[in-house]
Image (tube, helix red, strand yellow):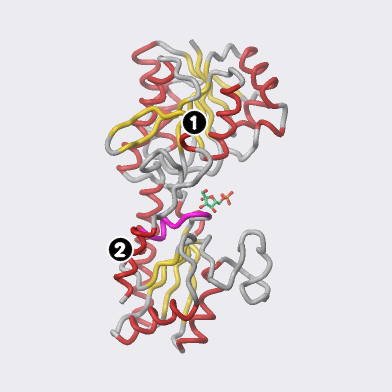
């Protein structure tokens, strides 16, 4: 039996640990053959495929990125199921493991509905996929963001400045919530909760009056109550002014103007997705890889592995699709109490 593996969508620390777990166990315990597909669905459609051997996966769990490369290509825009079938047949590929986020899993579901043998492994640093409690890459992103905020606090303290740290999270605020709590932020701003600039400035001022250099953790998808969709209006800020950067850079001058506290913004960006995965992410990714291999052996096409509680379980693709896992109001209420 030959199994193709692809990684698709934005990368996440832990992808290599998933690949290693599948290939290592598959060769060692079941004498399976593996085909590495480069750059996600793009590589499948373009037949950029190689025999994935044991030596390719030696020692890769601790490395960030993905040895297979990735892209955001949607297979339905280029050839679709007929092309996927044709390539799989030509390479004697009996099954496919697709490791990716919502877009990847949605494409995998459509292909699986058409009879193509696929299983999925969920992946996103944003931790916004439904049906799984945590995704690998999230813990690493939180660690990096927390360390960065700790550093911002020492320079903020020295200059008596308010520091705004913008972290990833296009649609949800899990990274901002966790790193903000860990770093002791004085305000945490997430897409799920619209706030006014006055409210944010009140938290900042109160922290300053307590003798603290305020730290504001903001998710990139956060919107002020006066804003519409930042992503569809990339060119303008909330007040119709040209935007240079993300929401952090929009907020910093507004906070400074209203509070009189000198304010600086830092956007952490892709640093959160690069480099060594944490031990937690390596373990989670390894367990998910093992789970995906079991699904292939059991021919559970149309399913993906998921973490529920402490168990690795199988769920149908549709369980993870349709709605995102957002930060519940009750979780936000817990941290809002800390803003003073
Ligand atoms: O979905 C994960 C994510 O890291 C988001 O937090 C971020 O908005 C986006 O990907 C960035 O995408 P790209 O790497 O394509 O710029």
**Which residue is depicted at the point 47% across and 81% down?**
198
Residue 69 in view, yes or no: no
Q: In which quarter of the image is residue 213?
A: bottom left
Q: Position of residue 165 (x, y in %)?
A: 44, 67
| Label 1 crowd bin: few (<14), some (14–19), many (20+), radius 10 Å | many
Q: Does the residue labelled 2 lie within 8 Å of ligand 1?
A: no
Q: Residue furthest front?
A: 330
Task: Compare residues 278 and 339 and report the one nearer the observer.
Answer: 339
Q: Quadrant of residue 175?
A: bottom left
Task: Tell me, for residue 70, which label it has, or none.
Answer: none
Task: Compare residues 172 and 46 and report the one nearer the observer.
Answer: 172
Looking at the rendered structure, the number of numbered marks drawn on it comes to 2
**Which residue is depicted at the point 28% across and 84% down?**
210
Q: What stretch is highlighted in magenta?
A: 171-177
Q: Does the residue labelled 1 lie within 8 Å of ligand 1?
A: no
Secondary element type, mark 2: helix
Residue 12 in view, yes or no: yes
CB under 8 Å between callouts 2 and 1?
A: no
Left or right of residue 321, residue 229 in this image: right
N-terminal-most mark, 2 or 1: 1
Q: Position of residue 248 (x, y in %)?
A: 51, 69
Q: In the displayed structure, would residue 174 be above or below residue 215?
A: above
Q: Magenta segment: does it hold 17?
A: no
Task: Compare residues 281 and 319 and report the one nearer the observer.
Answer: 319
Q: Position of residue 26 (x, y in %)?
A: 39, 17
Report, in whole angstroms, how far the alpha carbon at label 2 lies from the one at label 1.
32 Å
| Label 2 crowd bin: few (<14), some (14–19), many (20+), radius 10 Å | few
Q: Mark 1 points at which residue?
A: 317
Q: Quadrant of residue 272?
A: bottom left
Task: Tell me, for residue 334, which label it has, or none.
Answer: 2
């Amino acid at each position: 039996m030959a199994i193709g593996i692809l990684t698709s969508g934005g990368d996440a620390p832990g992808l290599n640990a998933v690949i290693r777990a599948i290939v290592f166990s598959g060769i060692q315990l079941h004498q399976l053959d593996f085909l590495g597909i480069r750059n996600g669905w793009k590589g499948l459609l373009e037949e950029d495929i190689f025999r994935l051997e044991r030596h390719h996966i030696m020692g890769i769990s601790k490395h960030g990125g993905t040895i297979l490369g990735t892209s955001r290509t949607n297979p339905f825009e280029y050839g679709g199921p007929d092309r996927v079938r044709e390539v799989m047949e030509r390479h004697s590929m009996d099954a496919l493991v697709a490791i990716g986020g919502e877009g990847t899993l949605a494409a995998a579901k459509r292909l699986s509905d058409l009879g193509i043998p696929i299983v999925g492994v969920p992946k996103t640093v944003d931790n916004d996929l439904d049906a799984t409690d945590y995704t690998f890459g999230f813990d690493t992103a939180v660690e990096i963001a927390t360390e960065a905020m700790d550093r911002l606090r020492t320079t903020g303290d020295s200059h008596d400045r308010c520091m705004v740290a913008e972290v990833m999270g296009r649609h949800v605020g899990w990274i901002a919530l966790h790193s903000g709590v860990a770093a002791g932020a004085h305000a945490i701003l997430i897409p799920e909760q619209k706030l006014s600039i006055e409210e944010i400035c009140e938290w900042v001022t109160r922290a300053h009056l307590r003798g603290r250099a305020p730290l504001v953790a903001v998710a990139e998808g956060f919107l002020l109550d006066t804003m519409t969709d930042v992503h569809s209006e990339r060119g303008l800020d909330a007040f119709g002014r040209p935007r240079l950067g993300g929401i952090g850079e929009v907020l910093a001058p507004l906070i400074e103007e209203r509070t009189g506290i000198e304010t600086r913004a830092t956007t952490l960006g892709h640093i959160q997705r690069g480099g060594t995965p944490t031990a937690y992410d390596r373990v989670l990714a390894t367990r998910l890889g093992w789970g995906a291999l079991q699904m292939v052996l059991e021919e559970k096409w149309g399913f993906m592995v998921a973490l529920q509680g402490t168990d690795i379980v199988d769920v149908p693709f549709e369980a993870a699709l349709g709605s995102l896992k957002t930060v519940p109001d009750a979780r936000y209420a817990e941290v809002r109490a800390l803003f003073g």
